[in-house]
């Protein structure tokens, strides 16, 4: 849920709120294998591929001129998707992460970080009524949430999902915090622009659509981001919200891979009550969430090849244990006349 001066909605008659959750059990983890580091690099990590397969590209990135890391990766068939400054003992260094199919490569080398940010699930979002300027202070009254999945609209354009209550609605029916940006703490990083669709205005679906910035070097990837130190999950499709299914979610407060199971028929009375009391169609889980996790991706337990399947958008918590409920993705896609973006 958003970290906001006032919650978007608060439940009555149920011990819970429309804001998010606390930590749960971590999913089976996927980590980088530490690989040999060519001169000029201080970290080389590979996931879902061997160190031998990344040796050549790591050397190419290490020997590339300043500002040439992106070109070196692209020339070797990798898609750079995120870079972040790494201040190590005062030296200007940066980490860059790239994808090739399901394989992931992380390299740290000297120089200034290129701007690669694009929309991806699991990133921290800031919502504000006033205009947001990248790199400057966050406007007062802003709310912090988490990004969900990327979708492809029938027009062919891309959009990014998050929870509708993160933006909020004014008494006159207009969107309250209508501007959004992906955040690089402590300031906004990539400015996304204004909310394009706000579904709670007409439907019991706690979802909204954000623009996805395009441009040179700004790639769009179908992943659940897990930070620089852990390889992202690859989003492969949509799964049914079947009771008993093992699932996870990622949130800006609780962190990546907070896992549990989808509750079955025993949760149906609660879900029906929430549809009336909170005006939200949801499926509830045994995972715990916290304020700020709102809008984040709910997905199936990761497979051994690093793929996950989308389930929905983190919406609210309920009960004394702050159990998370999410908005199913299928009706959101139907209302938006969209399909899940899986990189094609």
Image (spheres, rainbow, N blue to C red):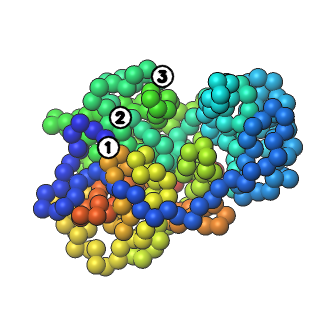
Name the residue at the front extreme: 89
- Horizontal and vertical percent for residue 47? 71, 54
Secondary structure type for disc 3: loop
Vertical comparison of 81 with 340: above or below: above
Query: In this rendering, would 80 be left or right of 273?
Result: right
Give yes or no for contact between labels 2 and 1 (Cβ–Cβ under 8 Å): yes
Q: Residues within 10 Å of mark 3 (few under 14, many from 20)?
A: some
Quadrant of the image occupied by residue 79: top right
Q: Determine the residue positioned at 70% across, 50% down.
A: 104
User: What is the CA distance from the residue labelled 3 to the residue labelled 2?
Assistant: 15 Å
Query: In this rendering, would 82 be left or right of 251?
Result: right
- Horizontal and vertical percent for residue 318? 25, 62
Find residue 127 and name its label. 2
Give yes or no for contact between labels 3 and 1 (Cβ–Cβ under 8 Å): no
Q: Determine the residue positioned at 56% across, 37% down.
A: 118
Q: Earlier in the sequence, mark 3 or mark 1?
A: 1
334 and 90: which is toward the camera: 90
- Horizontal and vertical percent for residue 152? 52, 48
Vertical comparison of 270 with 222: above or below: below
Q: Determine the residue positioned at 64% across, 40% down.
A: 81
Query: In this rendering, would 118 be left or right of 68?
Result: left
Q: Which residue lies under the disc numbered 1?
A: 2
Secondary structure type for disc 2: strand
Q: Determine the residue positioned at 28% across, 74% down.
A: 267
222 and 64: which is toward the camera: 64
């Amino acid at each position: 849920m958003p970290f906001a001066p006032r919650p978007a909605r608060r439940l009555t008659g149920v011990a819970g709120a429309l804001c998010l959750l606390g930590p749960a059990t971590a999913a089976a983890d996927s980590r980088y294998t530490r690989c040999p580091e060519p001169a000029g690099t201080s970290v080389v990590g590979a996931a879902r591929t061997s160190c031998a397969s990344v040796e050549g590209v790591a050397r190419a990135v290490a020997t590339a001129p300043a500002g040439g890391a992106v070109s070196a990766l692209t020339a070797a068939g990798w898609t750079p998707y995120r870079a972040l400054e790494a201040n190590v003992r005062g030296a200007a260094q940066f980490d860059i992460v790239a994808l090739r199919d399901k394989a992931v490569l992380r390299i740290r080398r000297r120089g200034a970080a290129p701007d690669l940010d694009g929309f991806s699930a699991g990133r921290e979002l800031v919502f504000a009524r006033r205009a947001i300027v990248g790199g400057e202070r966050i406007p007062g009254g802003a709310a912090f949430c988490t990004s969900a999945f990327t979708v492809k609209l029938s027009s062919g354009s891309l959009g990014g999902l998050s929870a509708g209550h993160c933006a909020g609605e004014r008494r006159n029916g207009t969107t309250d915090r209508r501007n959004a940006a992906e955040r690089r703490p402590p300031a906004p990083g990539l400015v996304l622009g204004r909310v394009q669709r706000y579904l709670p205005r007409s439907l019991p679906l706690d979802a909204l659509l954000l623009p996805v910035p395009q441009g040179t070097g700004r790639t769009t990837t179908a992943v659940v981001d897990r930070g620089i130190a852990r390889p992202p999950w690859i989003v492969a499709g949509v799964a049914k919200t079947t009771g008993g299914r093992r699932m996870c979610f990622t949130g800006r407060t609780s962190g990546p891979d907070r896992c549990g199971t989808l509750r079955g028929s025993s949760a149906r009375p609660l879900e029906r009550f929430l549809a009336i009391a909170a005006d939200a169609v949801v499926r509830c889980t045994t995972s715990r969430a916290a304020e700020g996790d709102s809008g984040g991706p709910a997905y199936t337990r990761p497979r051994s090849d690093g793929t996950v399947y989308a389930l929905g958008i983190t919406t609210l918590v309920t009960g004394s244990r702050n159990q998370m409920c999410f908005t199913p993705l299928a009706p959101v896609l139907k209302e938006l006349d969209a399909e899940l973006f899986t990189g094609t």
